[in-house]
Image (cartoon, rainbow, N blue to C red):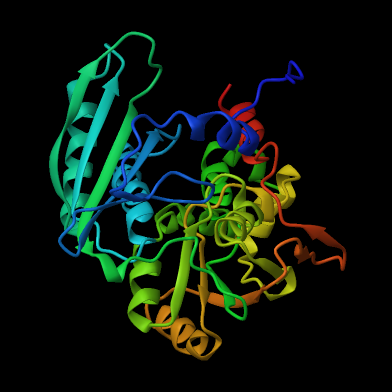
Amino acid sequence: MSTGKPKIGKIDVEIFTQFLLHRLGKPDPSVIVPPGTGIDAGVIDLGDGRVLVVAEDPIFATPGQPLEMFGWYTVHIGASDVAVMGVQPQYMTYSLLLPPETPDADFKTIVNAIHRTACDLGIAIVGGHTGYYPGFASPTIGGVTVFAIADKNTIVTPAGARPGNDVILTKGPAIETAAILAVVREKDLRGRYPDDLIGKAQALCRQMSVVLDAQVAKKAGGVTAMHDATEGGVIGGLFEIADASGVGMCIDETRFVYPPEVRMVCEAFGIDPVAAIAEGSLLITAEPASSPAIIQALKLAGIAASVIGTVTDLPHHRVITRRDGSTVPLAVPKQDPFWPVFFEGVR
């Protein structure tokens, strides 16, 4: 039942599972990983030992940031959803929708940034749509589709977590939250916190990708599942892996990597870090014997990570022990706390 209060962000899990998942067009047995809670990309069996992995995302420009970063996000956020499936992103399409008054220089800046970032990640752009339309207040990617063809046996999905696995988190929680709010609401932070810490929070914008995280972890071996902790944050992402895999989890927040700049931004705006959007924070489940090698490989790549808990065989027991000692269930937040704070800052 509607409360009359508008929701910002993804639709509720209940609407997704009870309504949307029953409206997926013609059933096809070649779709071996269909849409589902926590599934980052679909997988189609090509019938020759290979699969097609496909992911889709919208991308919005962040006020106060250079348009080059908008182009960078477009590629990295889309590519991250394919990388967490254990494969190298190869191809992409995108739809760039622009306000009619957009200067030619801005248009070219965005397209050049997308092109350069795709080149950096080894991705070919194979199609899309670009145009000027009333109703858009700023440049918007209506959808970026990233896909890859890979050996069927190389695929990792968020449904692969097994009892006894370790749970690993890279970078810490609320990476995207801290990065974006430090830009959009910089004035609210200045004078309250050290300038160098604010600068570190803003620099997290370049950490809003899990392409490298996923590639390094997969190469290290022993990975059973990966998931990009986006809307709903780490606590939502953990629930989604557990739900997709039909397992339980026991998580300890005191074991998280916790950058001080993330603490600062979340404290400033009264945001729970584990519940806030966290693009750039990769959740991994792995065989315990492989965890040290995965964490060491990530460290060598400049990515901090830690084991934050364990996968169990009790599907009805999915909990996180918070830093204050309380224990709460893993769940997707009804409202990601990032969005109201973000839109308050851009109004």
Q: Is residue 317 above or below residue 66?
A: below
Residue drawn at x 38%, y 82% as measured from the top left = 221
Residue drawn at x 17%, y 53% as measured from the top left = 123
x, y percent for residue 241: 56, 59
On the question of residue 193 being in view, the answer is: no
Count of marks placed on residues: 0
> In which quadrant is the C terminus drawn?
top right
**Is residue 283 or residue 85 the one in the foreground?**
85
**Is residue 164 or residue 70 the one in the foreground?**
164
Quadrant for residue 96, please give it: top left
Q: Is residue 273 above or below residue 10?
A: below
x, y percent for residue 293: 45, 88
Residue drawn at x 57%, y 42% as measured from the top left = 181
x, y percent for residue 346: 56, 26
**Is residue 6 or residue 44 the one in the foreground?**
44
Quadrant for residue 324, please give it: bottom right
Q: Is residue 194 above or below residue 165?
A: above
Left or right, 189 with respect to 282, comes to right
> In which quadrant is the N terminus drawn?
top right
Left or right, 319 with respect to 161, comes to right
x, y percent for residue 314: 72, 69
Q: Is residue 338 above or below residue 272?
A: above
On the question of residue 323 being in view, the answer is: yes
**Is residue 62 or residue 279 the one in the foreground?**
279
Residue drawn at x 51%, y 42% as measured from the top left = 183
The residue furthest top is: 134
Left or right, 200 with respect to 130, comes to right
